[in-house]
Image (spheres, rainbow, N blue to C red):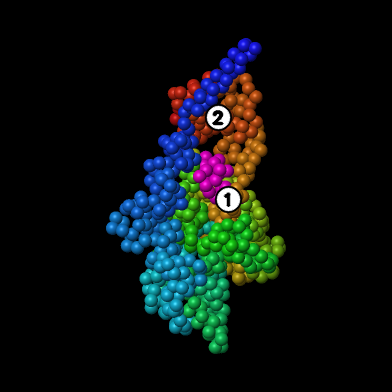
Amino acid sequence: MRKFILCSALVLVMTALSGAAVMAAKPVDNDGDGVTERSDCNDNNALIYPGAAEICTDGLDNNCDGLIDRADPTCTAGVCSDADGDGYGFPADPSCSYTQEDCNDTLASINPGASEVCDNGVDDNCDGLTDTADPACGTNPHASNTWQNYPLDCLSCHDQQFNEMADSTHYWWVGDTTEMANQNGTLQGKLTNSVNSYCINILGDWPVCGKCHVGRGKRPDDPQADKTNIDCLACHNEDYAMARTRLADGSMAPSLAGVENPTAEELQVLDGYTQNINAPTRKNCLKCHAFAGGGNAVKRGDLSMSGTDLHGATLLEGTDNNSDPNFDVHMNVMASDLKCQSCHVFQNHKTIGRGSDLRPTDDLARGSEVKCVTCHAGFDVDGGHAAAGANRTDADRHVSKVACQSCHIDHYAKVATELNRDWRYSHDGTPADGTNGPGHPELTIGEDLSPVYKFWNRLSDNYLLGDVAVIDPETGAYPTSRPIGDINDGKLYPFKYKTGVQPMVSSDSKLVALDTYEYLAGSGDVDQAVQSGLVNMGYPSTEPVEWVTTDTYQLLNHGIAPAANVDCAKCHGDLDLATFSELDNLGYALKGPKAQICSQCHREKNLKSDHPGMHNHVDKGVGMDCLFCHSFSRQEERGGISPCDSNATDFVDTNPFAHPECSQ
């Protein structure tokens, strides 16, 4: 009995000592911000810890004092911020240059100097009054405008705005380039030298291609095109934008404007366009941007609008009337209901944001990128996703190398989009010999597609008219647009991949600007269209050509699904390490045979068969850098030991692997 009691006592003592050892363990600093979990009010977000600077517009208690944003005294002690770049900020006191305080410092369209939009449910001008409650909505300053005096009525009050528009890429269709590998710093754009895998180039076809220009009919480089050629209503009256078309005299206006003797009712409609002026709606923008390429959703693949497609099918859903968050959570009319300019913020009629296949940068001061963190603050740093929800911790490992779109656009072409265009055939598949008259070329379309992923450093190599075309051995096609980057340079982005079959001069390998007016609105004969295009380029009409395949990658930005839909398995599914995957194609492949890689550290062991198992076991201790197993490093972002470090022997203790990167 005494022996039993003694043994029991020893067990109790050992248990107590074991518990004490656990309690005495070193405190953990999960987010690496220098403050341990015992003192840090959020140890999963490196932006949050006692002593941190309070960010006054991110909805977080950054300094752990229990006060958030403007409730924190530090946000009223001379902290100057203009997060949305609209010229108004917080606070408005002598320590800052802002004469008035911005009531919403995340949206540039909302500030004390903005005009009140009278039907959007928002206090746009920060006076505490919304829509019709605002005196600014009590009278219509445009009530006396008439169609007969358009746009002179507009010019009489808005000459500055006309000058701003006349200096924009939206009007000129060319602009300065800052992110092109091909002739960067030159003027490039669709009016002159850009070439794509859709309508190729505008040469010879202003009448059709110019239908979406924000002018009243003339090319912007026409000597007779003065400020009266700017069409304000294309952006500032939704009904006008939807009715606008090319008239017989070459001007752009609603068809009513071409009626010889309009009735009083018809004149009233025309006058109404000039009298009802509003901020641009999605329809104003999508009338051109969703119908680029010749039909709804044809070109971009991530933009669409309700209506009909090229084949006459009725489309019941689109970004303009979207009530399904899975279609586009940002433009969902039942939730965010964002306007295009909420992200593509305009200043002085210049905007930000462009795809990888576009050339000019509209606003050189602000650049081309629309940044998600303008609204989703803090999600671009380690710990930002974890702070927003316990199930998002894995995402924080990716933010330095994976763009938001790659996770949040799980598929595109929610309305069918074009995947290939062959000018040799008419839309019905018959030869384009003019027998059936003018029309659209043959298209291959697809819907509910998975993106193609590529690394992009925000530089693009885009073909220009007159360039020598060079085949890409990776795709076997002649590129018209390529995002530049690789696993060591840039972030991973999702793209639409698209091909086209178009003519090329045999003697010098220059893509031919096929005369699309001849094809789309003239004879419909592809041979005549090619010959006319050759002449437009300065070649004889008999110059030999050959038909080649071109291709392009187009950045996907729209069609964001709810965050809960993000599925890591779309990239990190049950991939066996022995199977060459899409991730391997992107540069994630092992740098040598699996057994040889693992034998750096292990003598004999059952090797992990999947990616999660492998990565979980190398995250032990201070961690191993990716360079032990792959041809790239993430040591700068994640720390750990590299095979090039002197203490690499902490891991490598059996068969050292030759790492050529360490000798470079």
- Residue bearing mark 1: 563
What residue is shown at x 35% (from left), y 57% (from top)? 91
73 left or right, relative to 306: left
Q: Nearer the viewer, residue 412 or 326?
A: 326
First in sequence: mark 2 vs mark 1: 1
Q: Amino acid at mark 2?
A: Val
Residue 73 visible in rendering: yes
Which quadrant holds the C terminus? top left
In the rendered view, would you say 474 is above or below 130? Answer: above
Q: Nearer the viewer, mark 2 or mark 1?
A: 1
- Residue bearing mark 2: 618
What residue is shown at x 63% (from left), y 39% (from top)? 581
| Image-quadrant location for residue 169 | bottom left
In the rendered view, would you say 551 is above or below 130? Answer: above
How packed mark 1 is, by other alpha carbons closer than 10 Å (few <14, some 14-19, many 20 or more), is few
Give how far across and how far down residue 484 sits, in percent.
Answer: 50, 46
The span from disc 2 to disc 1 (Cα, nearest Å) is: 29 Å
